[in-house]
Amino acid sequence: MSIKLALDGKIHDVTIARRRPHLVLLIDGEEHEVSELPGLGDGRKSMSIGGHRIDFARAVLGQRQAVRLGGRTFEIDYVDPFSDSTATGSGQDVLKAPMPGAVVFVHKQPGDAVTRGEPVVTIESMKLQTALPAPRDGVVANVLRLEGQTFEKDEIIVTLESESEKA
């Protein structure tokens, strides 16, 4: 599963590819090996990424982090996939597959009401089952993959009625 981070107004997709023997992150599809991790908390830190030592200072500000690196200060925000403030158009009207796999169980059918965070379908990928939650309150419009059907990464599995259709 990936997380999204906002840096200088641009959203970046970050996924842990491996944890051993060193942490490997996929950042926007590019691998970065992190062999020395800094400790938690604020202050001066250093880490090794791709064999290069990087010195920086970090301050935790709630959900945000301020990082001072190379004479510049960056604010990094976690992007909540369920936050209304990050919704862009119809992005909150669909449930997309985070990885290729198959549908294991359909919790909600077209016409069913859902609340944000409620499981809509359960998928399986690489022997791991994951419940995909509703991105917002609404009504299920279509279930595009049924139990046992396979899908690719980023394929739409469920759609909700759009906000304009509710009016």
Image: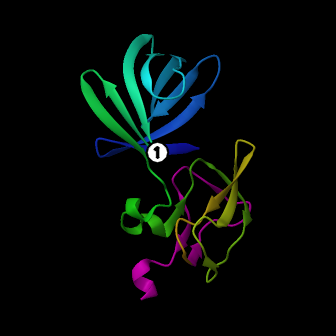
Observer able to see residue 57:
yes
Residue at the image position 36 percent from the left and 67 percent from the top? 89
Q: Quadrant of the C terminus?
A: bottom left
Quadrant where the N terminus is found in the figure? top right
Residue closest to the eye, 15 or 75: 75
Please state the horizontal and vertical placement of residue 5, each as a whole percent of the image: 42, 43
Q: Nearer the viewer, residue 94 or 137?
A: 137
Residue neighbourhood size for the residue with mark 1, other residues' Cα within 10 Å, grouped as few (<14), some (14–19), many (≥20): few
Q: Nearer the viewer, residue 125 or 42?
A: 42
Residue position marked by numbered label 1 in the rendering: 62
> Residue 123 versus residue 138: which sits nearer the camera?
138
Task: Report x, y in % for residue 100.
Answer: 61, 48
Is residue 81 depicted above or below 141 in this figure? above
Residue 99, magenta (yes or no): no
SS at circle 1: loop
| Picture quadrant of residue 97 | bottom right
Above-or-below relation of 138 to 44: below
Q: Residue furthest bottom?
A: 167
Horizontal side of 55 relative to 8 (left or right) equals right
Range covered by the magenta-colored residues: 139-167
Q: Residue at x 41, y 11 (%)?
A: 53
Residue 147: in magenta span: yes
Across and down, in percent, residue 25 comes to: 51, 29
Choose top left, top right, bottom left or bottom right for residue 27.
Answer: top left
- Please say whether residue 49 is visible from this viewpoint: no
Q: Amino acid at mark 1?
A: Gly
Quarter of the image for residue 143 reads bottom right
The residue located at (69%, 67%) in the rendering is 146
